[in-house]
Amino acid sequence: MAPHGTTGGDPAGDVVVGVSDSLAGLAALRRGILEARRTGRTLVAVRAWEPPEGEALYRRWPEPSWTRLWADEARQRLDRAFESAAGGPPAGLRIVRRVVRGPAGPVLCSIASSPDDLLVIGMARPRSPAARLLHRRPVHRHIPARAKCEVLVVAGPRLLPREARMLRRGELLERRGRTARLVP
């Protein structure tokens, strides 16, 4: 039996991964690498970005130099995600890196537009009610309703609130009598 996405010869479709800095995003990248390697498909790593103040405000006062700066920062974050998730770009795998301006949900749905694609996204653990009010609909809820391909949602690791704070700050972690420094 041929692996998923193959039709006897070359694999059909791509493994498209939405890449973010979150632990769930890094877990999704690791799973995307695994799926691409297992099926022999191309891994398309996508980093979507928007101006920090939002598109509406940016349209009122556009500044191309800031746009270049934000796009470069998104490229660097994509590179750092590969370093954090897999120690660098995996060898022996076809990888396409895409940095696209726009909201993550619509960007990922437009790139994974073939029914033969596999779209891999991370699902962060629930946030507090106050944090949920400030953010749009989560990507892991937007995509499955609109995607034209198979979607694989990867849950992020379960952490205690104290551990999450320590990871964000890059502090020392003490666990089971061992101390380990987190490397960014």
Image (tube, rainbow, N blue to C red):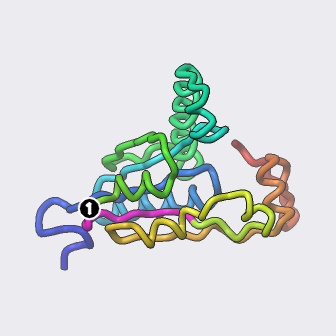
User: Residue 51, position in %: x, y?
Assistant: 59, 37
For mark 1, what is the residue? 114
Residue at 46% from the left image edge and 66% from the top image edge: 143
Lateral position of residue 109 relative to residue 174, left or right:
left
The quarter holding residue 73 reads top right
Most distant residue in the bottom direction: 1
Rendering coords of residue 163 (x, y %): 82, 62
In the rendered view, tell whether residue 127 sits above or below residue 182. Answer: below
Q: Residue at x 57, y 57 (%)?
A: 25
Magenta segment includes 178: no
Residue depicted at 49% across the width and 45% down the height: 102
Which corner quadrant holds the N terminus? bottom left
- In the rendered image, the quadrant that contains the C terminus is top right
Left or right of 24, for residue 82: left
Residue 9 rendering spot, x and y as whole percentages: 12, 63
Does residue 29 appear left or right of residue 112 in this picture?
right
Give above or below for 58 relative to 176: above
**For this rendering, which residue is in front, 48 or 172?**
48
Number of numbered discs overlaid on the protein picture: 1
Secondary structure found at label 1: loop
Within 10 Å of disc 1 (Cα), the crowding (few <14, some 14-19, many 20+) is: some
Q: Specify the segment rendered in magenta.
A: 114-122
Type of amino acid under label 1: Ser
Q: Is residue 104 above or below residue 101?
A: below
Q: Residue at x 86, y 59 (%)?
A: 174
